Amino acid sequence: MKDKFYNYIQKLQDTITSKLEEVDGNATFKEDLWSRPEGGGGRTRVIENGDVFEKGGVNISAVHGELPKTMQQHFGVEEANFFACGLSLVLHPKNPFVPTVHANWRYFEMYNKDGEIVDSWFGGGQDLTPYYLFEEDATHFHQVCKIACDTHNTEFYPKYKKRCDEYFYNTHRNEARGIGGLFFDYCKQTEVMSMQNWYNYVTEVGDSFLEAYVPIVEKRKELPYSEAQRKWQEIRRGRYVEFNLVHDKGTLFGLKTNGRIESILMSLPPHVQWVYNHTPEKGSEEEKVLKVLENPKEWV
């Protein structure tokens, strides 16, 4: 399974980066191959200063070795070996009317001293963070997520949408990071779902990403915007940074386990503002976004 999924994310990375280069029309992804001293490595691809994407990364990694102490404590096990692979992406567009997007699909195995698999699971999801709210865009994104889920189980979309709303939430701000999508983790074998079934589901969601996001980018990337709207985008990006550095489990895990800093912090936008006690005007488009972020909404 690990070879099968790693082969999948390698191909998916190629598919996504080539399509995004086509959408941008100017910038290309720069590739950075890296290795991890403890075992494994990855292929980081970053796009910067494009006509559409100000900064973005589409990264894959496959790492293995002895389970770090922090993970041993987390899973309640003693010495054990592990394998983990995944694709993680974040895209920060230049135009404030184009939303930031994040996605991740991953697979994990843990072994006993004899090298036998004692636990394995899939995880992942995709979520949207708009700076200005176009309800038809939010509906489109969620509709694609729902279709990918419904193919496998009609209970998946409401279940994993709810988890997404709960997870991508800045508790210190009492607001969501964005308008959500899907978030699932520890998807293990059950009587109903084999690991092959989970593979089929996760890859279905992965394959749906471009369909969920690219039409929104194409629709909004040429819209004219003002300096004030750009400033609002940069202020809201600050909330994105806050979530990633304060709450995001993947970021915190990477920082605590000698992860590759450049790849971990790839998710941070290049231009951000923190304005003291900034409050948008009553009834403005900016306030409209904040109202939606206060309480999760059903989009489909």
Image (spheres, rainbow, N blue to C red):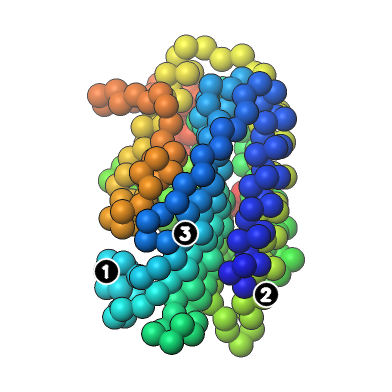
Report the amino acid beneath label 2: Asn
Callout 2 crowding tier (Cα within 10 Å): few <14, some 14–19, many ≥20: few
The local secondary structure at tag 2 comes to helix
Residue drawn at point x = 47 percent, y = 68 percent: 83
- Which image quarter holds the N terminus? bottom right
What is the spatial separation of the Cα atoms under label 3 and label 2, in whole angstroms? 27 Å
Q: What residue is disc 1 on?
A: 69
What is the spatial separation of the Cα atoms under label 1 and label 3, in whole angstroms? 18 Å
First in sequence, mark 1 or 3: give its number: 3
Where on the picture, by quarter, is residue 68?
A: bottom left
Q: Nearer the viewer, residue 156 or 256?
A: 256
Which of the numbered marks, if any, corresponds to residue 197? 2
Report the amino acid beneath label 3: Gly
Q: Nearer the viewer, mark 1 or mark 3?
A: 3
User: Is 284 displayed left or right of 198 in the figure?
Assistant: left
Q: Nearer the viewer, residue 13 or 168?
A: 13
Residue drawn at point x = 36 percent, y = 38 percent: 241
Q: Nearer the viewer, mark 3 or mark 2?
A: 3
Where on the picture, by quarter, is residue 98?
A: top right
The local secondary structure at tag 3 comes to strand
Q: What residue is disc 3 on?
A: 40
